[in-house]
């Protein structure tokens, strides 16, 4: 028992006891006043709010007088029960329930829940959650039925159900599915619309060997949802039903693909402090049961004020209400010298997180936004859009489902964002900032009960401007220096302001002032190598960088660079959100550049940046050679001698991993290279463009082409720029504009005498003309490309040009010519024995032969293509699906209908595994006698 043994219980009938002796609270109005104060324990409640809680919209004229009478009656009841202190305090505009040294069952339940979430042991978590549930003694706030209190009662009921769901998640993880069935059945009967509870009951029944009952549980839930709400069950329930229907055991991988439930929220901050009112408002708004198109909470405030931390904190608190997942993205709207993320790029990432395959994601922002709205329409999804630039960036990223919620953070108030409820954030109140400092440093170093130490902590907070980021950095300095006291840290912060940097700091009398002062303290504690690397790493425009790039930047080896980077992470001057990747907070980046401008001359800064860009160029060239040996000419653009080594890459898989990690940086890299040396930018664009196309990153290829075009000064620069722009536009389907740029690229390569570059542009133009239905012009460009490739002895490119010519003949209705073109391509490819490439040529030849009326020969070619694909590294690819589909067509032509259907089913299985067709499409193909070719096959054949 705490204090003098005051206990207040709200999780049931409202009760108060002192030292075990019950207080007589009087009639319902006194209990209503107490309940309203309890729901805001520790915070002032206005008289108007209390009057609403008692009388709703019909208060008597004497309401304030009667309110005062009820408060006096409560104080008297507490005193008569033995309480010797004032539990209800009078404030300027109302009253406050003093929750210090008072045991409140609601606070106890929330504490037990938080401890369970933090527990590493499942048994411990289950015990704490059960203990929390036992605190409910029936319906919370029972018999107190005003509108305001009913809303509070509903919140407490929702809390009980959330804790119950968390408990049964743990119980199921512990394998107690049989024991959980009875309790879950009772809860589902009580709350038939609570879908996660129903999913838990289905899982328990399924794991207990009762699949028929699990399916009946699903059907009952669907009937209720459709009848009462007009909606279908959530994806979690639908996936469970599908798995049970598949006849597999819960752990059987044959049950189908794993449910894609993104959980992308960054780790919460354990020391999160304050913002109680904001947290309460956001939780209520974002977990409301009201059906509406969307709910958006827009947090706005200065940099470093804690918008992101609040968004993530609230996101974790309400994550259980969104069983279909949580999406998170840093939109870089206020990241210095880094371009904000484009909505189309973010939508691509979100769609992938929700399970969409790369090949199915639209390139255009409007189409991608429509697809995102379609995919989220029936989901319960939380989306956190952090660090937004403006409404135009945010709007396409809002999910469509009426059960979806969105949190947006931005430095500016997004007043034009439709449907948003705005939550402006200011600096922490001093008391909260002092508490934050104490939590970060720990009670063994800071005893806030000691008035002298509390005053010293307040001095530190004031020097940090009460900005959470600054307080956090100051605390890290203190914890890393055991000999320092609070007074030591406060003196150093004050000395920093008064020292040689005072003039510069005086120019920063803005929201950032305290942060910069803290950065300066941290920076001064670094050794000289760490200081130099900190300055250098912030010279790059890339949002985050890998160790090899930093090693090149610093002119050192990777091991030394990684050790220095980790030291900076330890000092909280850099952050590492992914293994091997490092970046700085917005304001730290500016601070690092300021320090570099003061400590390093312009030549040394430019040399460091050039080394890093040469690392990017060297890696891009390696990637280009690995992707296509005939593309080596692309690596001859730009400097022949490089000042840094690139990342070591072995094979296509590593190339694609590198591209995926760096694709967000390439625009910044090309922009910075163009400012330093347009020839260097052209070299990077020339080497990296092919990889971007193969990864489907057409928007990124267009962007680097446009950046180079703006900086180009030589014919070669212009040729590379137009090639990248034209190639991207071709993949987007903007054929007219693509031809314009490809023609300019062709002219540029002709001017500088680059035959390989000319052949590539001619081949791309041939493809464009074919897609426009202009077959004669396509044939003409293909033949010109073939001639150039013969002359330059580039066999892979020659075979590709012949394949393209064959496909044009197919569209033009010239089957014999198509067979001849593919046959010549095969003759070139066979001696090279590049199996995946050979399989592609054989597949095209087989289909051409089939269309020419020779199914026996086509069957032989398809079987050879299947064998070549089997011997290649890449299996279960789109090419494999095309081969099996072609085999099916050929066997059907030969009258082997049963065997043909088996081939089509195998093709459909591959397409489904790749995410290119849905389960329903796969089922349709398996049931059809002669199925139509699905889109991925039709587009490619």
Image: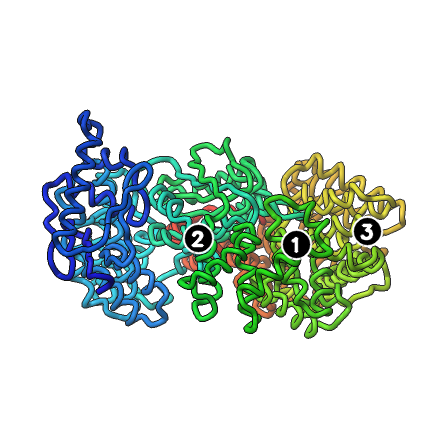
Residue appearing at x 36%, y 39% in the figure: 402
Instruction: Name the residue beneath numbered marker 3.
Output: 676
Q: Position of residue 933 (x, y in %)?
A: 49, 48
First in sequence: mark 3 or mark 1? 1
Report the disc number at residue 821: none
Left or right of 872, for residue 37:
left
Q: Position of residue 47 (x, y in %)?
A: 27, 35
Does dot 3 land on a helix, a strand or a loop? helix
First in sequence: mark 2 or mark 1? 2
Determine which quarter of the picture holds residue 905.
Answer: bottom left
Instruction: Name the residue beneath numbered marker 2.
Output: 432
Task: Tally the marks.
Answer: 3
The quarter of the rendered structure image containing the N terminus is bottom left
Residue appearing at x 37%, y 65% in the figure: 118
First in sequence: mark 2 or mark 3? 2
Determine which quarter of the picture holds residue 825.
Answer: bottom right
Most foreground residue, 149 or 759: 149
Q: Kindly report which numbered mark, 2 or 3, lies closer to the viewer in this rendering.
A: 2
Label 1: how many Cα within 10 Å (few below 14, some 14–19, many 20+): some
Instruction: Name the residue beneath numbered marker 1.
Output: 497
């Amino acid at each position: 028992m705490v204090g003098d043994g005051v206990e207040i219980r709200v999780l049931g009938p409202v009760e108060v006891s002192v030292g075990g002796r019950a207080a007589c609270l009087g009639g319902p109005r006194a209990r209503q006043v107490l309940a309203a104060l309890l729901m805001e324990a520790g915070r002032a409640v206005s008289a108007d709010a209390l009057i609403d809680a008692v009388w709703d919209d019909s208060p008597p004229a004497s309401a304030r007088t009667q309110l005062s009478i009820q408060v006096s009656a409560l104080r008297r009841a507490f005193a008569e029960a033995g309480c010797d202190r004032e539990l209800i305090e009078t404030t300027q505009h109302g009253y406050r329930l003093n929750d210090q040294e008072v045991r409140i069952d609601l606070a106890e339940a929330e504490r037990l829940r938080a401890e369970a979430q933090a527990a590493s042991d499942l048994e411990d978590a289950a015990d704490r959650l059960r203990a929390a549930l036992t605190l409910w003694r029936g319906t919370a706030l029972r018999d107190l039925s005003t509108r305001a209190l009913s809303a509070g009662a509903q919140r407490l009921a929702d809390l009980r159900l959330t804790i119950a769901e968390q408990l049964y998640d743990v119980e199921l993880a512990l394998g107690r599915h049989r024991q959980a069935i009875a309790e879950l059945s009772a809860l589902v009967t009580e709350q038939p619309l609570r879908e996660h509870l129903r999913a838990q009951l289905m899982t328990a029944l399924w794991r207990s060997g009762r699949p028929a009952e699990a399916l009946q549980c699903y059907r009952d839930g669907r009937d209720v949802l459709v009848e009462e709400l007009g909606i279908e069950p959530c994806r979690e329930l639908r996936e469970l039903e599908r798995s049970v229907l598949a006849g597999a055991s819960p752990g059987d991988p044959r049950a189908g693909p794993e449910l894609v439930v993104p959980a992308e929220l960054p780790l919460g901050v354990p020391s999160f402090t304050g913002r109680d009112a904001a947290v309460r408002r956001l939780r209520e708004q974002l977990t409301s049961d009201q059906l509406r198109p969307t709910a958006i909470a827009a947090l706005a405030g200065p940099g470093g004020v804690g918008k992101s931390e609040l968004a993530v904190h609230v996101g974790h608190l309400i994550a259980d209400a969104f069983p279909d997942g949580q999406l998170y993205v840093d939109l870089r709207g206020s990241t210095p010298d880094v371009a904000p993320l484009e909505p189309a790029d973010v939508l691509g990432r979100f769609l992938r997180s929700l399970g969409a395959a790369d090949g199915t994601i639209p390139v255009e922002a409007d189409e991608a936004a429509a697809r995102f709205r379609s995919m989220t329409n029936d989901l319960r999804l939380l989306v956190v859009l952090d660090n937004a630039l403006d409404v135009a960036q945010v709007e396409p990223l809002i999910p469509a489902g009426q059960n979806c919620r969105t949190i947006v953070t931005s430095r500016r108030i997004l007043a034009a964002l439709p449907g948003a409820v705005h939550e402006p954030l200011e600096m922490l109140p001093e008391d909260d900032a002092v508490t934050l400092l104490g939590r970060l440093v720990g009670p063994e170093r800071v005893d806030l009960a000691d008035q002298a130490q509390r005053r010293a902590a307040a001095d530190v907070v004031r020097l940090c401007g009460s900005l959470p980021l600054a307080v956090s950095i100051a605390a890290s300095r203190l914890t890393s220096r055991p000999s320092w006291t609070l007074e030591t840290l406060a003196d150093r912060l004050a000395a920093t302001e008064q020292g040689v940097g005072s003039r510069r700091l005086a120019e920063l009398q803005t929201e950032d002032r305290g942060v910069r002062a803290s950065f300066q303290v941290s920076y001064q504690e670094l050794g000289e190598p760490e200081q130099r690397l900190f300055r250098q790493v912030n010279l790059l425009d890339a949002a985050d960088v890998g160790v090899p790039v930093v090693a090149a930047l610093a002119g050192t080896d990777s091991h030394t660079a990684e050790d220095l980077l980790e030291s900076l992470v330890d000092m909280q001057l850099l952050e590492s959100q992914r293994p091997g990747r490092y970046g700085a907070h917005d304001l730290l980046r500016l601070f690092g550049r300021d320090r570099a401008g003061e400590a390093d001359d312009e030549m040394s800064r430019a040399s460091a940046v050039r080394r890093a860009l040469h690392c990017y160029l060297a890696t891009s060239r390696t990637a280009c050679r690995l992707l296509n040996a005939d593309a080596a000419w692309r690596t001859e653009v730009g400097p022949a001698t490089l000042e840094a080594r690139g990342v070591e890459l072995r094979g296509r898989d590593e190339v694609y991993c590198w591209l995926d990690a760096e694709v967000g940086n390439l625009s910044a890299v090309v922009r910075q290279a163009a400012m330093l040396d347009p020839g260097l930018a052209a070299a990077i664009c020339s080497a990296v463009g092919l990889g971007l196309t193969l990864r489907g990153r057409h928007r990124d290829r267009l962007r680097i082409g446009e950046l180079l075009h703006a900086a180009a000064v030589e014919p070669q620069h212009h040729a590379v720029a137009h090639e990248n722009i034209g190639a991207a536009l071709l993949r987007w389907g903007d054929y007219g504009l693509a031809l314009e740029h490809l023609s300019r690229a062709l002219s540029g390569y002709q001017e500088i005498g680059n035959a390989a570059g000319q052949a590539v542009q001619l081949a791309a133009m041939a493809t464009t003309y074919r897609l426009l239905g202009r077959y004669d012009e396509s044939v003409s460009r293909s033949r010109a490309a073939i001639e150039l490739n013969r002359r330059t002895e580039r066999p892979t490119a020659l075979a590709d040009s012949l394949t393209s010519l064959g496909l044009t003949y197919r569209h033009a209705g010239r089957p014999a010519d198509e067979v001849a073109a593919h046959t010549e391509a095969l003759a070139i490819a066979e001696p090279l024995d590049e199996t995946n490439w050979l399989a592609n040529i054989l597949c095209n030849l087989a289909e051409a032969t089939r269309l020419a009326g020779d199914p026996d020969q086509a069957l032989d070619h398809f079987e050879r293509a299947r064998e070549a694909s089997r011997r290649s590294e890449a299996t279960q690819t789109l090419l494999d699906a095309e081969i099996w589909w072609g085999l099916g067509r050929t066997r059907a032509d030969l009258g082997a209908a049963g065997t043909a259907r088996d081939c089509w089913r195998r093709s459909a299985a591959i397409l489904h595994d790749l995410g290119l067709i849905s389960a329903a499409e796969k089922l349709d193909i398996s049931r059809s006698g002669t199925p139509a070719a699905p889109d991925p096959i039709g587009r490619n054949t």
